[in-house]
Image (tube, grey):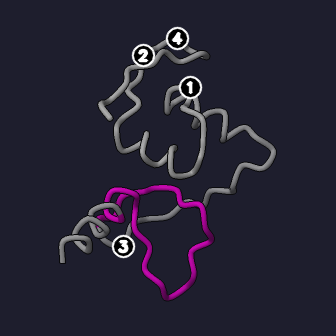
Amino acid sequence: MPDVETSCVQCKDAFLFTEKEQETFYQRNMMPPQRCPKCRGKKAAVGNDAPKRFEIVCDHCGKHDQVPFQPKVGRSVLCRDCHEASRSRAKFA
């Protein structure tokens, strides 16, 4: 499946529906997105059932970020970038 360029129904900007996203949507039996990632994020953030976000400081790089879970005392917490980097390193190990 090649990447597909789609127009957002909300902001009218073009966005890429990548091959990886297409695979994920297909596996979960979901319809293709009609909104760009930015508009999807905004819509999810204002919803009544939107998950609460917690401010953190990354234990690896010191960057401020938000996570969707309550950090526990004594457990390290990573920002999105460091978490993704550690996950990709684990895949190839």
* Residue 84 image offset from top left, x and y in percent: 33, 61
Q: For marks 2 and 3, give the CA distance.
A: 36 Å
36 vs 68, left or right, is left
Majority secondary structure of the magenta segment? loop
In the rendered image, which quarter contains the C terminus? bottom left
1 and 4 marks in contact (CB < 8 Å): no
Q: Give the magenta range.
A: 61-83
User: To which quarter of the image does residue 52 belong?
Assistant: bottom right
Q: For marks 1 and 4, give the CA distance.
A: 9 Å
Which residue lies under the disc numbered 1? Answer: 35
Dot label at residue 12: 4
Q: Is residue 48 above or below residue 16?
A: below
Which marked residue is nearer to the observer: mark 1 or mark 3?
1
Q: Which residue lies at the image location 56% right of the left edge and 25% below the top edge?
A: 35
Q: For marks 2 and 4, give the CA distance.
A: 7 Å
Q: Secondary structure at mark 4?
A: loop
User: To which quarter of the image does residue 54 belong?
Assistant: bottom right
70 vs 46, left or right, is left
User: 10 Å neighbourhood of mark 1: few (<14), some, or many (≥20)?
Assistant: many
Which marked residue is nearer to the observer: mark 2 or mark 3?
2
2 and 4 marks in contact (CB < 8 Å): no
Q: Earlier in the sequence, mark 1 or mark 4?
A: 4
51 vs 72, left or right, is right
Q: Name the amino acid type tagged 4.
A: Lys
